[in-house]
Image (cartoon, rainbow, N blue to C red):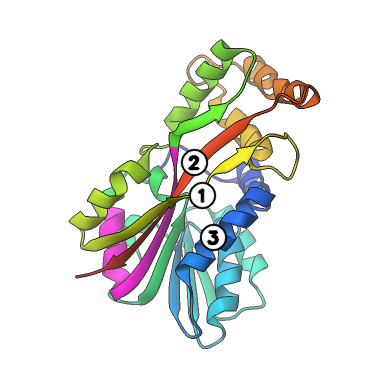
Amino acid sequence: MTNLTFADDMAHLQRTLAQCHDLVVRRGAVLQELNLRTGERVLEVGCGGGFYAYEAARCVGATGRVCAIDISQDQIAAARTRYAEFPWVECELANVAELPFANFEFDAVYANQVLEYVTTLNDALREIHRVLRPGGRLIIVATNWSSLVWHSSHSECMNRVLAAWDEHAPYPDLPALLAVQLRKVGIEPVHQKPLPILNMSYNENSYSYWAARLSKRFVVGRNSVTEAEAEAWLQEFDELEKQNAYFFSATPILTAAVRVS
């Protein structure tokens, strides 16, 4: 399904990343766009550690229903612990290309940084269309990874690391393709807007601090990047921070859409 999997240490890193300031801000933007109402039925595709499901559960209340799926048993276990106080939330191991739900079951579906990793994208979108009721809302957040700017004094090493990182997603610039793909399955895009991330400090509450650690684990052994090179790449960011020279920017895109047929 994806080259990037979240189990054990990688799952823990992803959950830590999800709690940084930049992604707390993003969660607020997604929830505002979803505009969930009391009693609604909502599906989260790729729930990770359950941070979004927890907030969605508070929005729809006990008369609503939140379903969440993930392909990582580690993530599901963490998510179930996070929303344990909400019995109207359920989480299960499932693939978005084969959703275990009935037709027209949900008022809203959302997927945050998930669909760019799905190799069977068209099947996934058809399944999302199937489980959405007519008029149901869909929110997708995906990053245009070619928009990434990450300053380094060692450009050759940075370029090789980023080239290795490019292998992590089958659709590294999914937002550019998404409107056309959605229309093919009967889902109409409403609008797209950027949710930019800019880090000028390398600290534990920033997105890029944890993204660097996650990326390092992925790139070792790919595109001739060795463990030593990846470690040196990571350590340079501490030096850049000391010099007030650190810079990172990326452009996730929020796509809002509605099922029309």
Q: Is residue 219 left or right of residue 105?
A: right
Q: Position of residue 258 (x, y in %)?
A: 31, 67
Q: Position of residue 160 (x, y in %)?
A: 51, 17
Q: Position of residue 32 (x, y in %)?
A: 52, 67
Q: Which residue is mark 2?
A: 251
Name the residue at 32% across, 63% down.
128
- Residue 17, compared with residue 111, is above or below; it is above
Give whichever of 170, 34 is nearer the camera. Answer: 34
Name the residue at 44% across, 57% down.
111
Name the residue at 33% across, 73% down.
136
**Amino acid type assigned to the residue bearing label 2 in the image:** Thr
Q: Which residue is mark 1?
A: 195
- Residue 24, compared with residue 136, is above or below; it is above
Q: Secondary structure at mark 3?
A: helix
**Tag on residue 22?**
none
- How far apart are the two marked residues, 1 and 2, measured between alpha carbons? 6 Å
Q: Quadrant of residue 144?
A: top left
Name the residue at 36% across, 43% down.
174
> Do callouts 1 and 3 mark residues in contact (Cβ within 8 Å)?
yes
- How far apart are the two marked residues, 1 and 3, measured between alpha carbons? 8 Å
**Label 1 crowd (10 A; few <14 / some 14-19 / many >=20):** some
Magenta stretch? 123-144
Q: Secondary structure at mark 1?
A: loop
Q: How many marks?
A: 3
Q: Earlier in the sequence, mark 1 or mark 2?
A: 1
Q: Which residue is mark 3?
A: 29
- How far apart are the two marked residues, 3 and 2, measured between alpha carbons? 14 Å
Is residue 201 one of those drawn in magenta?
no
Q: Earlier in the sequence, mark 1 or mark 3?
A: 3
> Do callouts 1 and 2 mark residues in contact (Cβ within 8 Å)?
yes
**Amino acid type assigned to the residue bearing label 1 in the image:** Leu
